[in-house]
Image (cartoon, helix red, strand yellow):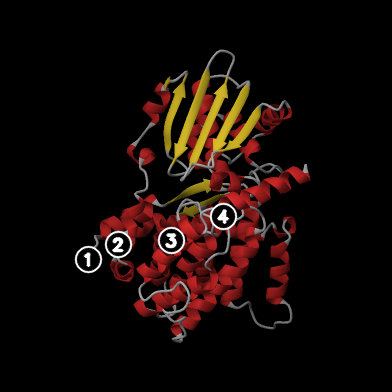
Amino acid sequence: MKVSETLLTEILKNETGISVGCTEVAAVALSAAWARKALGEDPERMEITLDRGTYKNGMGVGIPGTREIGIPWAAAIGACIGKPEEDLKILGNISPVVRDKAKRLLLNNKINVTVNRMAKEIYIHCKLKGSSSMAETLITQKHDHVKKVLLDGKIYKGWKEFQKPSFIKVKKKLEIKDIPFETFIPFVESVPLKKLTFLKKGLEVNRNFAKDCLNHLDEMELSPILERWSTEYKETSVRPDEYGKLITTAAVEARMRGFPKPVFTCGGSGNQGLVASLPLIGYAEKVAVPSNLFLRSVALSFLVTIYIKAYTGILSPICGCGIGSAIGVGCGLAYLLGGKQKEMEGVIKNMVGTTAGIICDGAKSGCAFKALLMVGMAFDSAKLAIEGVIIASRDGILSQSVEETLSNLEHLTHFGMAHADDAILDVMTKEESFLR
């Protein structure tokens, strides 16, 4: 099957972007901001209805520029900012005035958050009630796909005027899923680097984010220990794999705590964007890697991440960083080590055969531990595949081809774990009530 270079480049562009803060809380804030803009006044009450995945990921994550966590804070801040043109960067540069207004909304119990457990994809419905009008926003399919903005039941004119083709573009889930895996390496090896300029700019965003995080290690718990471990009892510099784990873990921990800087996302997730890129960035900083080879390795990492997420879903019961971007970055690392098709397939088998089933129990600081584990596994899987050590196709849920293996993973995710999100939410909401 011949796949056009333009199609794969467009998929990369469509599945990447910039976000400040966890993507789910940013999307909630974006939804509230559109409703506030339509309403034209501060709301008297707010009602937020979310799918299970968005609710789960927003419960325990930090809000940038504040010391607060959770969906009600994100919704309140979005409503108080009221600048939807900021898109998923809306949680950047939150002013003290906005924080105070949001706090008053919350103190007066004006925000109600519920879960629509029947929603099968991203579903963020925000309803704001004013003195005499009501505005509502619906985001579906992608975190920034605003499907409608209504004022008193009618299409809000300001939203229609704002729409642009790039703004309303929705991911076609089967577009990449129908492409043979074997086409990815020829693409990354032949695509002109000028077509990957957007990717290069995004990598600078993530590199800067990681560097800033390393300068704020005193505000974190896990990452300072890793930094000490990485240099303790060593006379030489930090090994490339340890450095890659350090900067990735620090970035994920800081982001989950609400570090107020933008990141370059992949497959609808900032953490996935960090995990798919930072181990490669760290490796390239410690090893002499030609810049063109490095950029192509990242393109492969992002493509594999997007490919796997097409099987498992944007939000799912399994960890997207672990069973998604960590596999992608493992393929990118194998590529830097001279691997070809066989080795890429080996990385996927090694990773899926080892880590499939690791659950996603929401976005929070503890995600840094999963990043640490999975990035380490990515380095090991890549090096083992290069040595020809690959889990046999007959083992467990693995199959001969990548496509068959990922179809098995899809079956495990959507059928075998069909009730996992409900069970996870039951536990998380019980714990939330207990803590209160």
Residue at (48, 70) in percent of width and height = 352
**What kind of element bears circle 3?**
helix
Crowding at mark 4 (Cα within 10 Å: few <14, some 14-19, many 20+):
some
Q: Is residue 16 above or below residue 180?
A: above
- Provide the secondary structure element on which disc 2 rests: loop
Q: Given the image, on which type of amino acid does mark 1 rest?
A: Met
Label 1: element kind: loop
Question: Whole-Å distance between the Cαs marked 4 and 1?
Answer: 36 Å
- Is residue 326 visible in the rendered image? The answer is yes
Q: Check whether the beta carbons of the residues at disc 4 and disc 1 lie within 8 A of each other.
A: no
At x 48%, y 30%, the residue is 137
Q: At x 46% / y 45%, what residue is drawn?
A: 120
Return the residue at label 4: 420
Quadrant containing the N terminus is bottom left
The first of marks 4 and 2 along the sequence is 2
The furthest residue to the top: 132
Rendered residue at 49%/81% (across/down): 383
Quarter of the rendering occupied by the C terminus: top right
> Alpha-carbon neighbours of circle 2 within 10 Å: few (<14), some, or many (≥20)?
some
Q: Is there CB contact under 8 Å for labels 1 and 2?
A: yes
Characterize the local packing of mark 1: few (<14), some (14-19) or many (20 or more) Cα atoms within 10 angstroms.
few
Give the amino acid at mark 2.
Ile
- The residue under label 1 is 1
Q: Position of residue 401 (x, y in %)?
A: 35, 73
The residue labelled by disc 3 is 410
Q: Which of the two labelled residues, at mark 2 and mark 3, occupies the earlier sequence position? A: 2
First along the sequence among labels 3 and 4: 3
Name the residue tied to disc 2. Answer: 179
Viewer-nearest of labels 4 and 2?
A: 4
